Amino acid sequence: MTTPTTSLISFDHTTVEDAPFRWHHVLDTFRPADAAELRGTFPRDGFRMVSRTGVDKSYAMYYRRLHPMDGGEAPPEPALPDPWRHFVAEVTGPAYRAAVAALTGLPIETASIEVNLWRYGASCWLDPHVDKPEKIVTHVLYFNESWPTGRGGDLLLLGSSSEGDVVRRVAPAANSGVLLVRGDRSWHAVERVRDGEALERLSAQVVFHQAAQEITA
């Protein structure tokens, strides 16, 4: 079977993992020149701080939406650089949808798509959680040129709701990403970024949503 791909995004170097739940580790997502161009033009404006302190989930990070769910209204945003306009067109197109469906075996043919950018600066974090039932699968792509060890910011794949129950730790390495299939036990978190250095964890997120009427209790 031919490995699915698109004109911009490659899944040629993808491994399927089963611990602590089913997920995919994607390496060499872009050609080097494309990765460098996206990294160099990663938007710096149009973000807003989002934070929450709650019993079920707490977080703090900076967020910018690039593409609304189908039928939604896009908020006014600064213009996107051309490489990112290409990126949005790619991940909302049929070839990318078919590639993700082929990799995961999930029925996403009619799913709506949301595309966001995230910046995690010092003291930003995301508590352990499982995604909402309407999320089918999420592709997280990382855009830092490098990320030092010991500075936080890792994606933590957990065996339970405890942040200490780390089964796999995924660094936000350059030109890599993960596909996370939503499940009742797919606990994950983002480790708090350490203070003391001008670090920002840069990522994009592509989310496939099922329609509300398709969600069952």
Image (cartoon, rainbow, N blue to C red):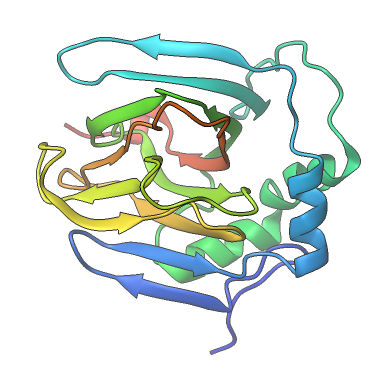
Q: How many marks?
A: 0
Q: Residue 60, how many percent across, how many down?
A: 40, 18
Give the x, y percent position of residue 53.
26, 9
Residue at point 41%, 24% (across, down): 124
The answer to which quarter of the image holds residue 211 is top left
Q: Nearer the viewer, residue 106 or 118?
A: 118
**Where 21 sits versus 193, above or below?**
below
Q: Can the viewer see residue 51?
A: yes
Res. 67 visible in picture: no
Q: Residue at x 52, y 50 (%)?
A: 147
Q: Which residue is at the far bottom?
A: 1
Q: Is residue 109 left or right of residue 194?
A: right
Image check: 72 left or right of 15?
A: right
Name the outermost residue toward the front: 196
Q: Nearer the viewer, residue 114 or 142?
A: 142
Compared to 178, does 122 lie above or below?
above
**Residue at figure coordinates x 9%, y 44% from the top left:** 160
> Compared to 213, does 53 lie above or below?
above
Res. 8 image quadrant = bottom right
Q: Quadrant of the C terminus?
A: top left
Which residue corresponds to the image point at 63% horizontal and 19% vertical from the top-left? Answer: 72
